Image (cartoon, grey):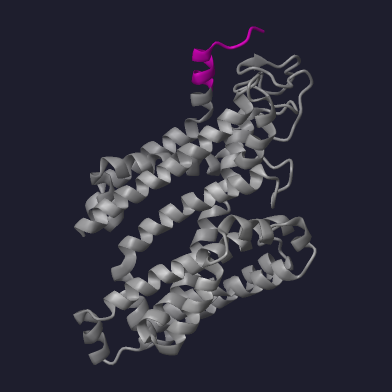
């Protein structure tokens, strides 16, 4: 077989990504059709910058979701004579496999295209969820610190500043060092940090349905049941059904990301709370006799959503870069992992001769972060109009 031309390479790559194009088309069609009913998300489609950023982010999100359908080869499989193969190189003996390495092969004869696709899944299974837990911790601590002030605010702010005073990259390297994995530190930190989502949702529902005991007990009970189940599986790897689990190195990276991001979120939430708590609608809720957590979670927090949503998008971008940095230095992830940072590191040694193995994941990482930044800009622009 003859090698593919660049036009054929692009055509085949677009064809493999067909599930992504269909999902994007459906998402945009439905969102634009009902955008006036979708609040801030719907208003995003009035911003050209926001739509471009949203399209890029959703492209990678759908790529990660449909990765098993998109990949042409096992991202860890090595094919004889495909070492450092050029884009579009045919396999010597395809047999039942896809006949080409669309974007070439790396130094270990693995398919660059498939590793790029699976790399999206590796990144997107950590960054958004780590950012989400960081926000839950920051909200749980930042709201009472700003609302009550006093000694509580002083103590929590001091602890946050203590963490933030340490250089971020050095703190990351310290937390994900292989020697740390042999200690109880990651498990203890995970045990403390992973309680936050359970507490957050429990307090949220309890404050909302406090006057409706039947609903409150049902919702809170369901949250506690699922939360404790997930907690046992993720922290102690003791889920008997195997639904919730996380490898030690992945848990280490996850905990490090959450620990580093939570203090910054705390400071943002605290600052917004100090401003909003003086508003008239907060005073009206206090006059009605609403409890402190109801006021914080259902009066103050919704009115702080604009800046927090923007920061959430940016934080996912920062986390993606940090994960890529850790992967580049071989920290926190297994060496064979197809995450973009590890792939860039593996390909950089032959960058001047075989640029594809390093350039493909580098451009992928850059595009995802760019999309998140553009999405944040669009959300900021629309939230200011709200």
Q: Quadrant of the N terminus?
A: top right
- Judge whether residue 138 can be spotted in this image: yes
Q: Based on the displayed image, in which of its 4 quarters is residue 88 positioned?
A: top right
Residue 257, placed above or below residue 364? below
Q: Is residue 293 left or right of residue 218?
A: left
At a point 49% along the width and 80% down the height, the residue shown is 156
Residue 182, placed above or below residue 33? below
Q: Based on the displayed image, in which of its 4 quarters is residue 283 positioned?
A: bottom left
Q: Quadrant of the C terminus?
A: bottom left
Q: Is residue 87 left or right of residue 370?
A: right
At a point 37% along the width and 36% down the height, the residue shown is 25
Q: Is residue 167 left or right of residue 157?
A: right
- Judge whether residue 72 can be spotted in this image: no
Residue 151, placed above or below residue 203? below
At a point 60% along the width and 24% down the height, the residue shown is 356
Q: Which residues are magenta?
A: 1-12
Percent x, y of residue 280: 19, 81
User: Which of the pair 247/149 is nearer the observer?
Assistant: 149
């Amino acid at each position: 077989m003859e090698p593919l031309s660049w036009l054929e390479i692009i055509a085949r790559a677009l064809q493999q990504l067909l599930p992504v194009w269909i999902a994007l088309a459906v998402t945009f069609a439905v969102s634009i059709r009902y955008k006036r009913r979708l609040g801030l998300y719907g208003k995003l489609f009035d911003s050209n910058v926001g739509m471009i950023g949203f399209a890029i982010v959703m492209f990678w999100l759908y790529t990660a979701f449909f990765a098993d359908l998109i990949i042409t080869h096992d991202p860890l499989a090595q094919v004889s004579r495909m070492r450092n193969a050029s884009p579009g190189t045919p396999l010597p003996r395809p047999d039942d496999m896809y006949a080409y390495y669309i974007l070439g092969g790396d130094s270990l004869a693995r398919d660059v295209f498939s590793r790029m696709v699976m790399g999206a899944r590796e990144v997107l299974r950590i960054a958004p969820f780590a950012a989400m837990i960081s926000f839950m911790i920051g909200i749980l601590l930042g709201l009472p610190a700003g609302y009550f002030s006093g000694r509580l605010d002083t103590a929590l702010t001091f602890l946050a500043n203590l963490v933030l005073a340490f250089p971020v990259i050095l703190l990351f390297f310290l937390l994900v060092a292989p020697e740390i994995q042999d200690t109880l530190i990651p498990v203890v930190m995970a045990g403390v940090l992973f309680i936050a989502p359970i507490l957050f949702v429990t307090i949220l529902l309890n404050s909302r349905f406090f006057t409706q005991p039947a609903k409150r007990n049902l919702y809170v009970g369901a949250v506690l049941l699922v939360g404790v189940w997930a907690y046992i599986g993720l922290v102690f790897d003791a889920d008997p059904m195997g639904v919730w689990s996380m490898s030690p190195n992945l848990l280490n990276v996850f905990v490090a990301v959450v620990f580093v991001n939570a203090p910054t979120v705390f400071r943002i939430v605290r600052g917004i709370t100090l401003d909003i708590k003086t508003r008239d609608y907060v005073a009206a809720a206090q006059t009605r006799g609403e409890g402190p957590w109801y006021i914080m979670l259902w009066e103050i927090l919704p009115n702080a959503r604009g800046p927090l949503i923007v920061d959430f998008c940016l934080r996912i971008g920062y986390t993606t870069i940090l994960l890529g940095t850790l992967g580049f230095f071989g920290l926190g992830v297994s060496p064979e992992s197809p995450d973009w940072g590890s792939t860039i590191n593996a390909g950089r040694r032959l960058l001047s001769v075989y640029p594809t193995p390093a350039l493909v994941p580098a451009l992928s990482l850059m595009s995802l972060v760019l999309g998140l930044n553009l999405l944040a800009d669009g959300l900021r622009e629309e939230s200011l109009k709200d």
